[in-house]
Amino acid sequence: AVVNAAAAVRGMDAAHKDKARAAMKLLAESPGGGEYACDDGTKLPMAKVNDDYCDCADGSDEPGTSACNDGRFVCAHAPKAIPKAIRQSLPVAHAWVHSSKVDDGLCDCCDGSDEEGRPDVKCPNTC
């Protein structure tokens, strides 16, 4: 299966992006290679990443969709100012929203990266 690299890593934090990119490189080099490793070690074909079905128990395979209940979508750019209550629960140097807010028609990330899958929604970059 052909894997769209941009779609596969959409909404992933840096560590998960690195794992996904390494898997995509293997996939390109050999037809049988290129598996994504969930945080618990479960292996999935790259075609199952961001395919709108929660395959990993930790939800790490679906940051760009709302398939997993507790999934997190990492915004492409961190906002300039984050309210203190939210800042305490954010990963360092990142801003995220729950995956359920991805492509819902509302601009949650300051850069609009959570709505990139909705061409009908135009989000201004307020970062």
Image (cartoon, helix red, strand yellow):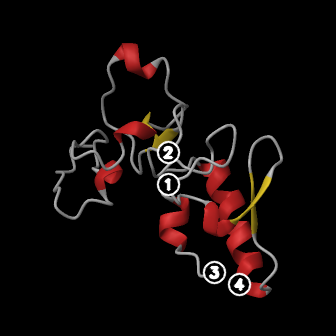
Mark 2 Cα shell of 10 Å, populated few (<14), some (14-19), many (≥20): many
Q: Which mark is residue 67?
A: 2
Residue type for callout 2: Ala
Whole-percent x, y for residue 113 in the image: 34, 53
**SS of the residue under disc 3:** loop
Q: Mark 3 or mark 1: which comes first in sequence?
A: 3
Q: Does residue 96 appear anywhere in the picture?
A: no
Q: According to the image, label 3 marks what residue?
A: 1
**SS of the residue under disc 1:** loop
Could you say which is closer to the camera, residue 58 or residue 124?
58
**SS of the residue under disc 2:** loop
Q: Mark 2 or mark 4: which comes first in sequence?
A: 4
Whole-percent x, y for residue 38 in the image: 74, 48
Rendered residue at 33%/37% (across/down): 79
Mark 3 Cα shell of 10 Å, populated few (<14), some (14-19), many (≥20): few
Q: According to the image, label 1 marks what residue?
A: 52
**Does the residue at mark 3 contact the one at mark 1 (Cβ under 8 Å)?**
no
Residue type for callout 4: Ala
